[in-house]
Every structure is written in structure tokens, then in C-alpha cells.
């Protein structure tokens, strides 16, 4: 993972601002949309300033999630991971401490992937689409083992288990009870979205049509 010199976000005041008319959903607890997640990724990524984020990269991450049918419960997982790992920086280089000379970067790109991705999936770590596709492909590939060991029945638990198994090294007995650090970012975004919706609904008088639509 790339280490950042700044962790704050001077634009945090925008985190919970409603970006849509609340008529775009029927209930505060409706599944989060990618439009809302893109807003969170832009204004609530503590490792990047909004003006420095390439929106094309965010769109690529969304497209990859859709390609792999990421469920609503963990929607935005690739966005959250890229925010945490590199601040959406496709030229990011990190994990130098793991190299022999302590200077050579081992992790490359928006998801800070090691060279094993190149060997296993033919991933171009510096290319956002290739990097995200290899990342998701690896996680989805953990399902057979996760299903066998963890035996989770709920969709979210199954995906989280595959997620953490995909980004961490092998562990005897699996990592069924662990959670990826990326998930904290994603959960925060989901909470912000729900708060934003609640703010939109608050004070509206037409309960039958939600916000007077």
C-alpha cells in the first residue's frame, strides 16, 4: 500500500450533501447507487484531493464492478480499495520496504498490486482497467475455497470473505472472520449516503409522493 503524507480532506463538508433529488429513490434504505458512490469517492477519499482525481478512472472501476456483478451490499468495493491503496493514482508505487534493497517498489498502480498479478492474470498494473479487472478476477476466484471453508449463506459475508482472502496471503484455516481495511472506507461511504438521503427527506411534507414529486 502506498503511504500518504496527508490524511485529511479539506472538502469533507461536501461528504453528506445530497447529490440527487430524493425522488430518485423510494426509501432512505434503498440500495446505494453508483452515482452516489462516485460522489463519495470524489469528495470523501482521504488519500486524494477532488481536483486531482481522474474521473475516467472512477468510471473504469464502476464498469469493472458491473462486469463482475458485485452485489448491492458491497457495491463500491473497487472504488474503496483504490481510494485506500493509492488515492486513485495509476502511477503510485509502494511497498518498497519489502524489496531486497528497501528502495524498489513492489506494489504498482491504483490497487497497489504485486508482480504476481502480471504472472497470473497478465495484468498491466499501471493500466487502471487491467489492474481492476485482475483484482476483481482474483477475488471472484476465491469463492470456491471460501464457500468450502467459511460456508457463509449471506451474500455480503461471502463477498467480504472472498475479498479479504484475495488481498491477503494464504492462511491455514482461511480468513473467514477477517475484514479488509478497504471495507471501513466502503461502509463509511454507505453511511454517508444514507445520511444524505435522510437530510433530503427531512422536512418534506408530502409523505405519499416523497418530496413532492
Image (cartoon, rainbow, N blue to C red):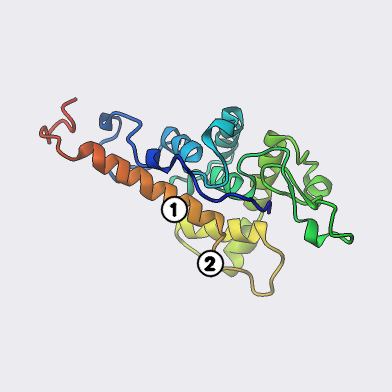
Residue 118 in sight from this viewpoint: yes
Residue at image point 47% right, 38% down: 43
Q: Is residue 57 above or below residue 107?
A: above
Residue that mark 1 sits on: 187
Q: CA distance from mark 2 to mark 1?
A: 23 Å
Q: Callout 2: helix, strand or loop?
A: loop
The picture quadrant where one finds residue 154 is: bottom left
Q: Which of 9/74 is in front?
A: 9
User: x and y percent of residue 112 in the render?
Assistant: 70, 48
State the residue at coordinates (67%, 53%). 3
Task: Where is residue 177? Give x, y as percent.
Answer: 53, 70
Looking at the image, residue 17 sits to the left or right of residue 88; the answer is left
Of labels 2 and 1, the one closer to you? 1
Count how many numbered circles sit on residues in the image: 2
Q: What residue appears at the point 60 percent right and 28 percent down from the top-left corner? A: 56
- In the image, taking residue 203 as reference, residue 7 lies left or right, namely right
Q: Looking at the rendered structure, which numbered label has been put on residue 165?
A: none
Quadrant showing the C terminus: top left
Residue 125 x, y percent position in the rendering: 76, 41
Between 213 and 106, the one lying in front of the other is: 106
Of the numbered discs 2 and 1, the one sitting upstream in the chain is 2
Query: On the image, which quarter does residue 121 sit in?
Result: top right
Residue at the spot of label 2: 151
State the residue at coordinates (25%, 41%). Answer: 199
Amino acid at each position: 500500500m502506498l503511504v500518504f503524507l496527508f490524511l485529511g480532506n479539506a472538502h469533507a463538508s461536501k461528504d453528506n450533501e445530497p447529490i440527487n433529488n430524493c425522488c430518485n429513490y423510494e426509501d432512505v434504505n434503498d440500495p446505494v447507487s453508483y452515482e452516489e458512490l462516485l460522489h463519495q469517492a470524489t469528495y470523501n477519499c482521504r488519500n486524494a484531493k477532488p481536483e486531482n482525481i481522474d474521473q475516467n478512472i472512477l468510471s473504469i472501476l464502476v464498469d469493472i464492478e458491473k462486469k463482475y456483478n458485485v452485489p448491492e451490499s458491497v457495491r463500491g468495493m473497487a472504488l474503496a480499495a483504490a481510494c485506500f491503496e493509492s488515492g486513485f493514482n495509476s502511477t503510485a508505487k509502494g511497498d518498497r520496504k519489502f524489496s531486497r534493497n528497501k528502495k524498489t517498489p513492489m506494489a504498482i498502480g491504483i490497487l497497489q498490486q504485486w508482480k504476481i498479478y502480471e504472472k497470473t492474470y497478465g495484468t498491466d498494473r499501471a493500466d487502471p482497467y487491467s489492474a481492476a479487472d485482475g483484482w476483481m478476477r482474483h477475488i471472484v476466484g476465491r469463492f470456491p475455497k471460501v464457500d468450502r471453508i467459511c460456508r457463509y449463506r449471506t451474500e455480503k459475508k461471502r463477498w467480504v470473505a472472498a475479498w479479504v482472502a484475495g488481498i491477503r496471503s494464504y492462511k491455514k484455516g482461511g480468513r473467514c472472520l477477517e475484514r479488509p481495511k478497504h471495507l471501513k472506507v466502503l461502509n463509511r461511504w454507505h453511511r454517508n449516503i444514507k445520511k444524505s438521503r435522510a437530510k433530503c427527506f427531512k422536512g418534506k411534507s408530502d409523505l405519499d409522493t416523497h418530496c413532492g414529486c
